[in-house]
Image: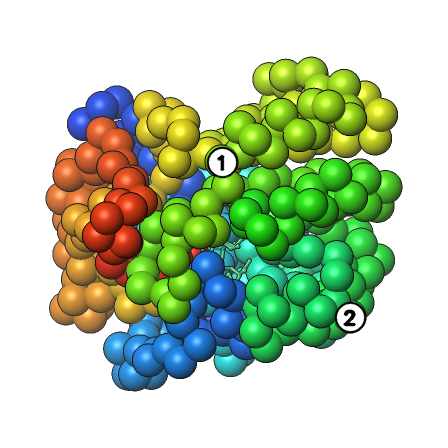
Amino acid sequence: MTLTHSVSATRPPLVDPFARAITYLRISVTDRCDFRCVYCMAEHMTFLPKRDLLTLEELDRVASAFVERGVRKLRVTGGEPLVRRNIMSLFRSLSRHLGSGAMDELTLTTNGSQLHRFADELADCGVKRVNVSLDTLDADKFRRITRWGELDKVMGGLQAARRAGLQVKINTVALKGVNADEIEDMVRWAHGEGMDITFIETMPMGEIEEDRTDQYLPLSLVRAQLARVFSLTELDYKTGGPARYVASAETGGRIGFITPMTHNFCESCNRVRLTCTGTLYMCLGQDDAADLRAAVRSSESDEPLHAAIDEAIARKPKGHDFVIDRRANRPSVGRHMSVTGG
Ligand code: SAM
Ligand code: SF4
């Protein structure tokens, strides 16, 4: 892939109406996945027709426009990013912004199923850290949670990632009655392998087959459970995301907590999310969005794209409004997490 669109040095950095600089873009490169995690997808999903997707060249063009406007960190996600055909050409192409110093970090969130194939090439593209989602260390339970996944393959991927020199962080969704009994073991395992681990609360996004109120496990309980066995100290450590970190003295690693349901982290939000169809969501928890695909396809010039980005950032809301409604049991955001990638 080659860079065909001119880069002007004069466009101003992106700042939203609440004076938050937009420095972080998450890009969902596909809505498809080789797993069907119970909290994320229904077993039978209808995926987008391929023609609706931005091409890899178009994804590069939009991402590069954001880099030009001050985005320093790009996270590639999905669906499962590593199942998109030829995805490495996008990483290769985006890595030029690391080389030029325009960007600080290129990274991805993955379920790990394809990491054994791509770890070396990712490292070669300048990727330094990856987030791997893993909710259990038990192979049968893993199959039940992911429906289609194989734990062995993910473990092989983790090994390949570490051999390639990638720093791995584990993301674990805390699920009542599913992995609540494994929280301590997962911390010991992750820290034993030199990886940080972050727990996430389930968010009410998209229709799934189960009752979300049955899955919801507040992280306040997870933290209290961990505090009984480990000496936890609050850390100032920030990765530019909403996670709050503590250190565990016994295991010598960091534990993060992402608590969208119980803690409002919106005031420091520096991010926006692009879907694989070129829709820009200014907030994970709101439905308002902007269509950047039309802008990209309207002209060879990037002017309409930058105008659409400016217009979108001017509408970034102050915060989200997640509620799991027990009576209605309806998601408060209709789209699945696999659309925006979390
Ligand atoms: N497929 C990749 C993966 O699983 O890492 C990337 C996309 S996945 C949507 C990103 C993260 O969102 C994963 O850590 C997953 O566990 C989390 N996730 C998915 N649905 C969620 C939900 N409803 N609530 C909270 N986290 C969710
Ligand atoms: Fe796929 Fe990730 Fe969603 Fe699981 S959480 S179904 S791996 S997109």
The residue that mark 2 highlights is: 152
**Cβ of disc 1 within 8 Å of ligand 1?**
no
> Label 1 is placed on what type of residue?
Pro
Residue 227 falls in image quadrant: top right
Local SS, label 2 = helix
Q: Is residue 24 above or below residue 149?
A: above
On the picture, is 267 further left or further right than 166?
left
* Colour scheme of the rendered structure: rainbow
- In three-dimensional space, the C-alpha distance between marks 2 and 1, rounded to whole angstroms, equals 29 Å
Q: Earlier in the sequence, mark 2 or mark 1?
A: 2
Going by the picture, which residue comes out furthest to the front?
Answer: 327
Q: Position of residue 6 (x, y in %)?
A: 32, 56
Residue at 66% in and 30% down:
225
Residue at 39% in and 49% down:
213
Depth check, front residue: 307 or 285: 285
Residue 321 falls in image quadrant: top left
Q: How many residues crowd mark 1 within 10 Å: few (<14), some (14–19), many (20+)?
A: some
Q: Position of residue 38 (x, y in %)?
A: 49, 65
The answer to the question of whether label 2 and label 1 lie on touching residues, with beta carbons closer than 8 A, is no
Q: State whether residue 145 appears in this view.
A: yes
Depth check, front residue: 199 or 309: 199
Residue 132 falls in image quadrant: bottom right
Residue at 58% in and 40% down:
199
On the picture, is 19 further left or further right than 76?
left
> Label 2 is placed on what type of residue?
Asp
Q: Position of residue 11 (x, y in %)?
A: 25, 39
Local SS, label 1 = loop
The residue that mark 1 highlights is: 218
